[in-house]
Amino acid sequence: MTSARLRLAAPPSKLLLVRRAAQTAALLLGVTRAAAADPSDGDAPERPTVSAAATAESGAFLPMGVPARNDAQRAYLYLQGGYDAARGGAVFDTTVQANIVGPLSLRGGAAYVGPDGTLRPSVALTVQALRQSQHGIDLSVYGGYQAQGFNTVPAANLVVAVGRTFGRLTLLSNLGYGYGLEEGEHYGELRVAGLVRALPNLHVGLDARGRLDLERDADEPENEPDFDVVAGPVVTWTVGHLAVSASGGASVIKYRLSDAPVTVGAIGQLLVGSSF
């Protein structure tokens, strides 16, 4: 009888231990989250207040370039649309980038180039390898996948972004390479930009991008560009976490295996973004 009572009493004791372990784990999880949410406690440096102005100054809201620093915010996103007269159709781009851990971030989005294009999703991992405060320049590396790259076929791409801020002036350059996953296609690209903080919430500058087909043979995808160039001014106005950017300029494109001459036209785009 005594052994039977002991067997009956054992399960409640085990259940109590499980409950206490769960409560302890929940308490530790709560402390960890609180410490992460308030890094000002102890010796951890206080995280700066997130604002769209700082994100814009890093180059994140440029129509073509990607930023060399990703520590101005935890995440940002934007929607951009406009019209490219050289291509004869609408252009659309949406991007979101969020910090995962430390210098590592995840970037994803989708783009459309008219008039006969399709939605082109893309995804990339980016790591900020150098910081201006420690190394004299900002440098980030982007590596990812495009469902339709510059050569009109799926592509893996790599971009190295380098930037530096001199007072109110920010200079940024991107050097990229894309390798098509079909037909041996590959291409190179160069993007350069300069931004000036004219007012605390107003940035003005120039942004340019050039891309070139690096694979030369007679077996080319349909409507593959030989090269394209887009360049022009950009103006970004920010209020709190929100940003509105307008850009325009000239667009130039030449298609491979085509008798058509180089096409030149105007391009204009409007961007709405936010940082968190």
Image (tube, rainbow, N blue to C red):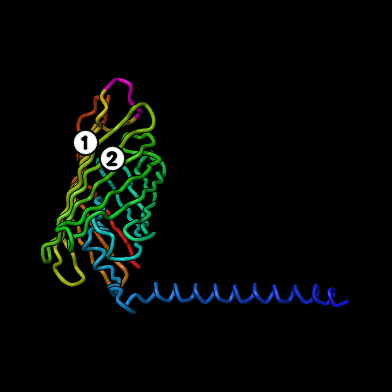
Which residue occupies the foreground of this view, 18 or 10? 10
Residue located farthest toward the bottom when viewing the structure as drawn: 41
Name which of mark 1 and mark 2 comes first in the sequence.
Answer: 2
Residue 184 appears left or right of 13: left
Which residue is rendered at x = 44% and y = 73% of the image?
A: 32
For the residue pair 207 and 263, the one nearer the viewer reads as 207
- Residue in the image at 85% along x and 77% along y: 2
Label drawn at residue 87? 2
Among the 4 quarters of the image, the one containing residue 260: top left
Q: Quadrant of residue 61?
A: bottom left
> In whole angstroms, how far apart are the C-alphas of marks 1 and 2?
8 Å
* Amino acid at dot 2: Arg
Is the C terminus in the top left, top right, bottom left or bottom right quadrant?
A: bottom left
The x, y position of residue 10, in whole percent, is 75, 74
Residue 37: horizontal and vertical position, in percent?
39, 74
**Where is mark 1, residue-wise?**
263
Residues in magenta?
217-222
Residue 153 among magenta residues: no
- Label 1, secondary structure: give it: strand
